[in-house]
Image (cartoon, coloured by chain):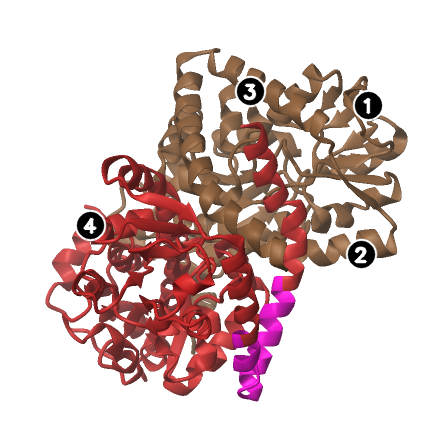
Chain colours: A red, B brown
């Protein structure tokens, strides 16, 4: 009899009970039933399935002592209500990305991604070893939430457009779905940024509510079918160079767990963080080929003149955000000190290597 | 009383016992005492401390049900004997890198790194989502070992030299510590590759046993003090673009664990894999500045003429390895199919982004 089977027999039907005040021995036997609400359509490739993967991993590593049920966007609450839902304890976990909550505090956007900021590898280094995680914890503490990195998209694509982007004028008046700081940059370039959950993008693009959209990259974008509407697909994703997806946990619910289960939950998020990133890295190429060869999508690089202006505007936008308040400035200083250093290092390591490999390939 | 405290009281002194044949309930109470032997000097930065981190993580996530004691190179067995030690069950876990065991099978080198091959991010994607892990498991199965990825160096530096490398002639007769396939490539370029454990490199370089050495990157290399002997420090690390460090586990010992502990051990290795990589990414810049500004090290790029020849020789060496036997060919096909695809994808994502960010920075 394996352990999972044993637990199935012994534990089914046991309701989750809070173990605060129970002895450690009783805690060790307590079964926990948790809810994870997400901003993603149910079972959406990599993002939704990544949330499922995280739930299964927690179940597996705890031998069933914690069972997590995952809810897609709109199943329990709408996508953009999950932060409040977990904050008040209606669900124990939420999966999304921090820039969705900029209405709470603009500074939270640093924990998703910054235009022309850190890549996935660099973001992980800043969070886990460069002081980023402590700042993120401080930022979510007022909401009673423990943040974790639990996914990363890698460098995104710049987006889908119905017309070519040849110069800055082509961005004037453009209604584009682009969240976070990238949206603010587009606004200063003359566009009209819109934020919508992923599940609403296809219809919005089809109906003309928006003229353009970015989402993630070839694998995810193919799943949504944007190629059926927009012809031009631009790179590189200057606005989201390595977006961290998050799992935030209700702090009181986390505190009720014995220490070993707390560690498992937090480390399962780290594994999920890596897992989503490797899935995107593995799957994007084939999807890109399908988009190009089967769907005749026109893949193009954003011109330097446009990127350069977006770079300047990005610096302005982020500097202004940093000046909003002391805490925003603290996060900015930490992030940009790290960015400056890692750019120099990667110029002679990752970047130098990738360029030489391509040159001789 | 927290859980760890409880276990300390209840569990100290309990000897590890094999639980094969015990009921699942008895298994859940069993305490396991494991040994991890490593190829690294005890507590060596990132590598040795990373092995310690892994052991602590297993202890923490299992609530002390497994306690792992870490041994540095030479403490229990010499660095290059750990594979056999874990294979025969004298220790349960070993931390090293697969190219150290090429004497067992040349094909094992694919699971460390390949000259001009995959970066850390790409290697993880191949292993966890591109079929690499299943091949690695098949490769270690005859030795009774379960492999895991449990660390990555990122793109390494090309190495330390006492004279400049301006052309291919400068590699003639060069006695250089360079393990794995990179060593074979150097041999074809006219050099004499040597493999030595890290702890022996400083003395070998000082005594003139070797003329040059590579190790990892600025943070690790500074710790060994190579700058005290060699003046020139070259990049990029064409020979090791993202070396996977491994933790292999004695399969019988793993099988004796209940399923939840098996999952914890394997996933703790994934977290350690990420942790070492973020430490290198975070720490290399400051160490590089120390090497340049304080120790006056001359940091130089390998010339294109040299890199191009090394690229050609790398292709030859790897293709010959693939032709040694059917299994080597299978691994080669999987690795190079993945490499071809991910290069194309990264040319419009990671690589395109890094180049634009540097251009405007």
Query: Residue A152: horizontal and vertical position, in percent?
Result: 40, 57
Query: Residue B285: horizontal and vertical position, in percent?
Result: 70, 56
Numbered label attached to residue A228: 4
* Labels 4, 1: front one: 4
Numbered label attached to residue B170: 1
* Labels 3, 2: front one: 3
Mark 3 / mark 2, whichever is N-terminal: 2
* Left or right: residue B269 compared with residue A327: left
* Labels 3, 4: front one: 4
In the displayed structure, B8 sits above or below B281; it is below
Task: Report the residue at 70% width, 36% height from top.
Answer: B158
Asked if residue B85 shows in the view, the reply is no
Numbered label attached to residue B315: 3
- Per the image, the residue denoted by label 2 is B290
Give the Cα separation between the discs numbered 4 and 1.
56 Å
Mark 3 / mark 1, whichever is N-terminal: 1
Q: Which residue occupies the extreme left position in the image?
A: A13
Chain bearing mark 4: A
Of residues A137 and A330, which is closer to you in this image?
Answer: A330
Task: Tell me the crowding category of disc 3: few under 14, some 14 to 19, or many 20 or more residues within 10 angstroms, Cα based.
Answer: some
Give the Cα separation between the discs numbered 1 and 2.
27 Å
* Left or right: residue A253 compared with residue A44: right
Q: Main secondary structure of the magenta part?
A: helix
Task: Tell me the crowding category of disc 1: few under 14, some 14 to 19, or many 20 or more residues within 10 angstroms, Cα based.
Answer: some
Q: Which residues are magenta?
A: A317-339
Find residue A328 and report its image quarter. bottom right
Q: Please tell me whether mark 3 sits on a helix, a strand or a loop.
A: helix
């Amino acid at each position: 009899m394996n352990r999972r089977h044993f637990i199935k027999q012994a534990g089914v039907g046991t309701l989750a009970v809070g173990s605060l005040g129970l002895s450690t021995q009783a805690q060790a036997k307590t079964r926990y039933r948790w809810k994870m609400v997400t901003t993603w359509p149910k079972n959406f490739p990599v993002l939704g399935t990544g949330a499922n993967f995280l739930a299964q991993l927690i179940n597996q590593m705890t031998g069933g002592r914690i069972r997590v049920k995952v809810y897609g966007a709109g199943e329990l609450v709408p996508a953009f209500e999950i932060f409040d839902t977990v904050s008040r304890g209606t669900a124990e976990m939420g999966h999304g990305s921090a820039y969705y909550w900029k209405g709470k505090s603009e500074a939270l956007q640093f924990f998703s991604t910054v235009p022309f900021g850190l890549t996935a590898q660099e973001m992980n280094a800043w969070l886990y070893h460069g002081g980023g995680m402590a700042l993120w914890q401080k930022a979510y503490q007022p909401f009673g939430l423990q943040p974790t990195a639990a996914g990363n998209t890698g460098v995104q694509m710049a987006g889908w457009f119905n017309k070519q982007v040849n110069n800055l004028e082509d961005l004037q008046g453009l209604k584009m779905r682009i969240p976070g700081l990238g949206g603010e940059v587009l606004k200063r370039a003359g566009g009209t940024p819109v934020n919508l959950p992923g599940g609403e993008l296809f219809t919005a693009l089809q109906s003309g509510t928006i003229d353009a959209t970015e989402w993630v990259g070839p694998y995810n974008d193919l799943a949504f079918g944007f190629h059926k509407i927009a012809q031009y697909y631009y790179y590189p994703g200057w606005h989201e160079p390595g977006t961290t997806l998050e799992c935030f946990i209700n702090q009181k619910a986390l505190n009720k767990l014995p220490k070993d289960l707390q560690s498992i939950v937090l480390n399962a998020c780290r594994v999920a963080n890596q897992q989503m990133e490797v899935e995107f890295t593995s799957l994007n190429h084939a999807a890109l080929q399908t988009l190009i060869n089967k769907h005749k999508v026109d893949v193009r690089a954003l011109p330097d003149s446009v990127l350069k202006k977006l770079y300047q505007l990005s610096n302005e936008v982020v500097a202004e955000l940093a000046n909003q308040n002391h805490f925003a400035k603290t996060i900015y200083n930490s992030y940009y000190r790290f960015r400056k250093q890692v750019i120099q290092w990667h110029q002679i390591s990752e970047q130098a290597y990738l360029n030489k490999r391509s040159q001789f390939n």
